[in-house]
Image (cartoon, rainbow, N blue to C red):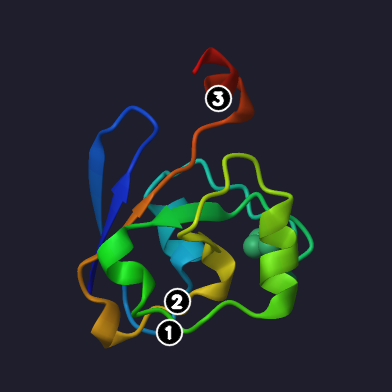
Amino acid sequence: MHVRFITRNGETVEAEGSAGTSLLELGQAAGMPLEGTCEGQMACSTCHVIVAQEWFAQLPPASEDEEDMLDLAPGVCATSRLSCQIDLVDELDGLTVRIPPTSHDMQRG
Ligand code: FES
């Protein structure tokens, strides 16, 4: 299955993943700057991605713990998710997510 990452520079990176991996693992394998410091324990927010609007509703809703962590993530927006909490399934073929801007980029506007 296919996932499309949009980098901070606006470049598109296509990645091929298999069902059963997390979006975080696939992003890391594709060279995206997703640290995933806590390795999926929902204790950091370094795996934050912004999901394309048209895909957001197709993901299982975020748990309360995930929402709490997202509140702390820089550049969070309405379709933000923690990529470690998104398991790739065949239905998500074509999923598009954006790497959020760093706080530095936000200051620059
Ligand atoms: Fe830490 Fe996702 S890797 S919350």
* Residues tagged 1 and 2 counted as in contact (Cβ below 8 A): yes
Q: Quadrant of the N terminus?
A: bottom left
Amino acid type at circle 2 is Thr
Q: Can the viewer see residue 30 in this picture?
A: yes
Find residue 65 and report its image quarter: bottom right
Element on which disc 2 rests: loop
* Sooner in the amino-acid sequence: mark 3 or mark 1: 1
Q: Is the residue marked by circle 2 packed among few (<14), some (14-19), or many (20+) residues within 10 Å?
A: some
In the image, is 1 to the left or to the right of 57? Answer: left
Given the current orientation, which residue lies at the most extreme front position? 78
* Sooner in the amino-acid sequence: mark 3 or mark 2: 2
Residue at the disc numbered 2: 21
Given the current orientation, which residue lies at the most extreme top position? 108
Q: Which mark is residue 20?
A: 1
Q: At 23% from the left edge and 42% from the top edge, which residue is drawn?
A: 12
Amino acid type at circle 1 is Gly
